[in-house]
Amino acid sequence: MRLLIIRHADPDYSIDSLTATGKIEAELLSRRIAPLRDAYFYVSPMGRARDTAAPSLKLAERTAVECDWLREFSPGFPHPGKDSGHCAWDWLPDAWTAEPEYFDHLNWARTPIMKEAHVEEEYLRVTENLDRLLASHGYVRNGFFYRAEKANEDTLVFFCHFGVECVLLSHLLNISPMQLWHGTCALPSSVTTLYTEERRRGIACFRMSSFGDISHLYAAGREPSFAARFCETYDRMDQRHD
């Protein structure tokens, strides 16, 4: 089985859609995704994800299943290190790295602030829905791996968002999402790919072969959007600051 997790193209958050640049990115992405006509397509209900998926689905002459659990991961709460804190996945480094629990994939959601915001419940809602979907395709969660009850080479494509992408990867790879949220950056329209490996019959795990791939942009001679990144150095006032 192959999973493709796609972050939406350059967003216009004010209208939950895409910028002019994002629309170009989505069109370029479609040249890569549309040939996967036999894939299974799933999309977040949020406008920026649906608008990213639309060119690929149109070109492939396919539709996607809309999944509420693929919407951006957004338990709301104030958190340390960010005055306008409203999410679990955008903390300043001196805040989240001060807690050893955040590096533990079993205990990261059990700190007082995470408990107060019921983050673990939302995480479980997402991952349990993911596991139900994978089970319907023949792969059943068993602890930290999957039983390949009906091994196959299906391709599942998810059009979603960075925060929830890291939740999916956290679950599939058994890594704390705090490390993924703060240590990786999936640029707009990027594609992350995972494959199953079944080295012993019936025992499968997911392995990531690429993260945040934007080769479809480079193939068209287009630089990626800066969205999702912060300033490379603090004195770069032309780049995004906190």
Image: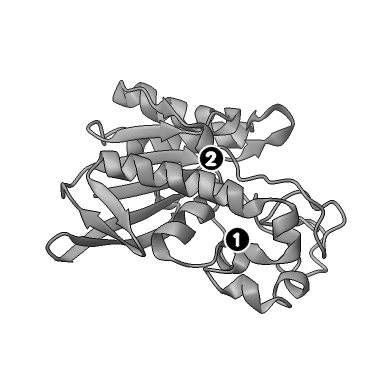
Name the residue at 35% across, 40% down.
133
Residue 59 position, x and y percent, is 34, 24
**Dot 2: what SS?**
loop
Q: Is residue 4 above or below residue 108?
A: above
Name the residue at 44% across, 41% down.
129
Task: Return the residue nearer the eye: 233 or 150.
Answer: 150
Q: Amino acid at mark 2?
A: His
Q: Is residue 106 above or below residue 55?
A: below
Name the residue at 87% across, 56% down.
83
Quarter of the image with the C terminus in it:
bottom right
The residue beneath circle 1 is 181
Residue 180 position, x and y percent, is 55, 64
Q: CA distance from mark 1 to mark 2?
A: 16 Å
Residue 67 position, x and y percent, is 47, 31
**Dot 1: what SS?**
helix
Task: Return the residue nearer the eye: 45 or 78.
Answer: 78
Q: Indicate left or right for 138 with 164 as reference.
A: left
Name the residue at 65% across, 65% down.
110
Query: Tag 2 or tag 1, which sits nearer the N-term?
Result: 2
Q: Is residue 162 visible?
A: no
Mark nearer the viewer, 1 or 2:
1
The residue beneath circle 2 is 8
